[in-house]
Amino acid sequence: MTPIRFHNTKTRRKEEFEPVIPGKVSMYLCGPTVYDRAHLGNARNVLLFDVLFRLMREIYGADNVTYVRNFTDVDDKINARAAQSGRAIGDITAETIGWYHADMDALGAMRPNAEPRATAYIQEMIDMSAVLIAKGHAYEAEGHVLFSVESYADYGALSGRSIDDMIAGARVEVAPYKRNPMDFVLWKPSPDGVPGWDSPWGYGRPGWHIECSAMSKALLGETFDIHGGGNDLQFPHHENEIAQSACAHPDGAFARVWLHNEMLQVEGKKMSKSLGNFFTVRDLLDQGVPGEVIRMVYLTTHYSKPMDWTEAKRAEAEGTLRKWYGILQGHGFNAKLVTALAAEGKWQADAEFIGVLANDLNTAGAIARLHVLAKGRTPEALAGFAHGLGMLGLVNDWDAIPMFDGAEGGADVLPAVAAKVDALLATRAKARAEKDWATADEVRDVLNAAGVQVTDVGGQATWTPGPDFDAAKLGDL
Ligand code: AMP
Ligand code: ZN
């Protein structure tokens, strides 16, 4: 089995991955608060976890991987949106979840095995809060239930801060009912007009952090393998999740590996509404940027590095995909061919590709390996390349290999066209060998006019249809 290594934020080391239950993998990603369209930043860890999910399914088998991603559908931002718009909360959250699915589907992200909504786990959150009170880790004050950070010795271990540093550095909400300013809310009262549930502490609603502790326990157990989110969530959200879960279930280890992705920026600046550089995923899709291109841009940067969204990267990603899809089309890849290759045992992962990806999800390295594999000349030789594209989520439907304008008409047309281009390249090679530069230049001009992009590597010429590809201009040979 390919060894998998992750940089574990919890231990600050790169470690070899061993699942808690041999042969089974469990993973949890903090999902969106559903009141608005997902922005480009939100997509970053969705795509990271999608590649992780695909890698784990490849290595452990699809039935042995459980991926949970929550929807936060009870939150003051949602209440504010409802009050502002006069719409019902349930309508807003249902509509936003629909948008989220459509946008993430367009990016080729597989749906997780479970997508729990916080409002479906209120009882579990109440039960967990009651356990924390019973064990002396939480207290009730003025209709609130607060977690006592001083009751948990390791509070701050994930982000590496002491409670005193946190108080000095954070804008904490000082409330008279808090014993320590860092104590955080497990439950709070709901005034009229705000969603609420009955609880031992009165009518109210949960704080944000408790939902991930309660839902991961319900769906994955007290100890599970991998937990992720943006590094903006490390403190306080993940610190608080750990405190709640460790204190409620001292025999469990909660998440053993923590993966945190860096933030997305736009043209070198943090993406934010106030700078006017704020895009939603839907904005880009509506501008005609294909989901595969958006995805490819993300995967060219390692998740642990800040990532810039730039127009130049978009153009480069589109160029690469155009070339790669042209290769797949040229070799007639579709579901039938994939099945035939699988039957012959040829549809399999390239070991080097998997090895690179399994090394802390080095997606940029995996893409570099695909560039090498793309030089294969037969469907058999290209099987590892095509399989790798599927593993990165760049081809999800083999009968509809995504094509871009200009390279269209692919599957049926390309084999005939390919023969023509190959013949032209053979003529050029012969002319060059004979130092017949006039003929070589003439062929080059024809290929240029038709928009064929030729790459000469090690004496071998490969080609792809470029953005302005026009087979009619290849002439009659
Ligand atoms: P939110 O809906 O704000 O709670 O965020 C949902 C997820 O998106 C969390 O995992 C955040 O860490 C992540 N996230 C938010 N903004 C960015 C950003 N600019 N870059 C990368 N990830 C982000
Ligand atoms: Zn969470």
Image (tube, grey):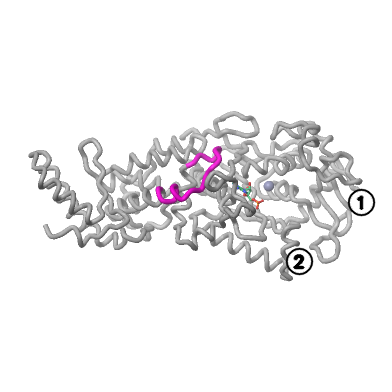
Answer with the quarter of the image where residue 96 lies. Answer: bottom right
- Report the residue at 63% width, 54% height from top: 273
Q: Is residue 54 above or below residue 71?
A: above
Task: Examine the structure image and report whether residue 313 is included in the region drawn in magenta.
Answer: yes
Where residue 249 appears, as percent x and y from the top left, is 76, 40
- Report the residue at 68% width, 40% height from top: 234
**Mark before the other along the chain sequence, 2 or 1:** 2
What stretch of residues is rendered in magenta? Answer: 301-316
Q: What's the residue type where badge 2 is placed?
A: Ala
**Which of the pair 63/52 is nearer the observer?**
52
Residue 385 as seen in the image, left or right of residue 197? left
Quadrant of the frame with the C terminus: bottom left
Q: CA distance from mark 2 to mark 1?
A: 25 Å
Q: Label 2 belongs to which residue?
A: 83
Q: Label 1 belongs to which residue?
A: 142
Where residue 233 appears, as percent x and y from the top left, is 67, 43
**Which of the pair 225/434 is nearer the observer?**
434
Tag nearer the camera, 2 or 1: 2
